[in-house]
Image (cartoon, rainbow, N blue to C red):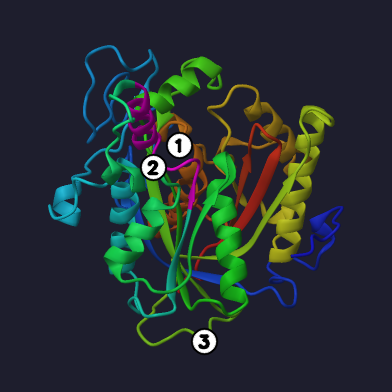
Amino acid sequence: MTTLAVTEPSTHAGAGAGPLPGVVPLDIVGAGVFSAAGPGLAALADLPGGATAGATAGATAGATAEADGSWPPLPVRGVTGFDAEAVLGRKGLRGLSRTDRLAMAACLAAATGAPGGAGERTGIVLGTDVGSTAAQADFFRDTFTRERPYLVNPSAFPGTLMNSAAGRTAIRLGLTGLNATVSGGALASLHALRYARNALVNGHADRLLVGGVEEASAAGAWAWHRAGALRSGAALGEGCAVLVLRAGTAGGADRSAGDGEPLGRLLACETGYADPVAEGPLGVAARLAECVRTALLRSGVTVGEQPLVVPGAGARRGWAAVELRSLRAVFGPLPDSRAVRVDGALGETHAASGALRLATVLARWQAGAGDERAAVLTAVGQDGSVGAAVVTRPARA
């Protein structure tokens, strides 16, 4: 998709003018969520900024507690209220990684709650970092510790693949349409949304289950700890949020019988890149600001409408300042009433962050909170990748 060169979105026609001609909105008609706040969308409606949901160093809720010191001294926000056997049944559960279980359960919840059912043109687009870090660490450890010729357990190998969760979920739910896994670190969820948007707009699917997943594991926690990537006191998190998307029209005229009012409408998702070495943090900040302006212009949302802003880098050392600089360049000073920050309650959920933050906005609107018409989600990765998405709330009756 060609990126628009934009200088200032507020020069677009007045507030509420609607998206640019040719921009197809995506209706969000279902959601499945498992997070440190609890299961379901409603659990995200009123997140306390400093909550200590889930578990802390050494044990993630629902996962096996490791009391032998294998976890680093790092606070962890584990998913609460998640019983994989109760949601998915006992059959076949043993061979699934925690990433597989979270993604499969969230997709099942989203598909169950959404109108229209599955169908052959329903698919899945899942954002992730590397897949299951625990499955990979366990498998590769065996190559060093077991007797030659490296007697690893072959049945464990599928769980090490990045697309394991999406593939197994599609089989479990009978989704025969498009199936894609998008790796993108902190941008994974936004990349998945953009991928899904292109697929739906170009007619490659009728409905897509789209989201991001991140598990908490000892191996992953050590990587964060050794890298010093989290700010002091920030927690590592885990979770999964999956949304059901379908192409709509500006007026919702094509809404199928029984679909009802969508939870929200995704109007734009822009991504970009700036070399953090060659251009420095200021270059990354400028590129993110450009993405935000482009997404606003495509959506027909103006700065003057004071959309809700949902940043994603608050838990990461250094990058929160880069993101904030970008947002201030576009919106000016950001009072607390216009910003939603979830990392205090959910922790740094990395690949799942964008999807969980979007779900938090939808939960806020479902609860009738706020008076904003739109929300802007941003993301920035340590490699210089940046992105922004714009979603609007359903029209009030």
Mark 1 and mark 3: span between their CA atoms? 35 Å
Residue at 33% of width from left, 17% of height from top? 71
Residue behind mark 2: 160
Decide: few, some or many residues near mark 3? Use Cα within 10 Å; few <14, some 14-19, many ≥20: few
From the image, state whether disc 2 or disc 3 is nearer to you. Answer: 2
Q: Nearer the viewer, residue 126 or 235?
A: 126
Q: Decide which of 360, 154 is in the foreground and name it.
A: 154
The magenta stretch spans residue 52? no
Q: Which mark is residue 349?
A: 1
Residue 343 at what x, y percent from top left? 47, 33
Residue at coordinates 73% horizontally, 33% vertically from top-left? 325
**Would you say the residues marked 1 and 3 are in contact, meaning their CB atoms lie under 8 Å apart?**
no
Badge 3 element: loop
- Nearer to me, 287 or 331: 287
Q: CA distance from mark 2 to mark 1?
A: 20 Å
Q: CA distance from mark 2 to mark 3?
A: 41 Å
- Relative image position of residue 356 (x, y in whole percent): 44, 47
Percent across and percent down for residue 251 are 58, 81
Q: Residue furthest front?
A: 149
> Which portion, as a residue range, is magenta?
127-144
In the rendered image, residue 177, in percent from the top left (x then y), is placed at 44, 74
Labels 2 and 1: the sequence-earlier one: 2
Tag nearer the camera, 2 or 1: 2
Quadrant placement of the N terminus: bottom right
Q: Decide: marks 2, 1 in contact (CB < 8 A)? A: no
Q: Dot 2: few (<14), some (14–19), or many (≥20) neighbours within 10 Å?
A: many
Label annotation for residue 254: 3
Q: Residue at x 36, y 71 (%)?
A: 175
- Where is 52 relative to 205, above or below? above
Q: At label 2, which amino acid type do we have?
A: Thr
Question: Is 135 colored magenta in this rendering?
Answer: yes
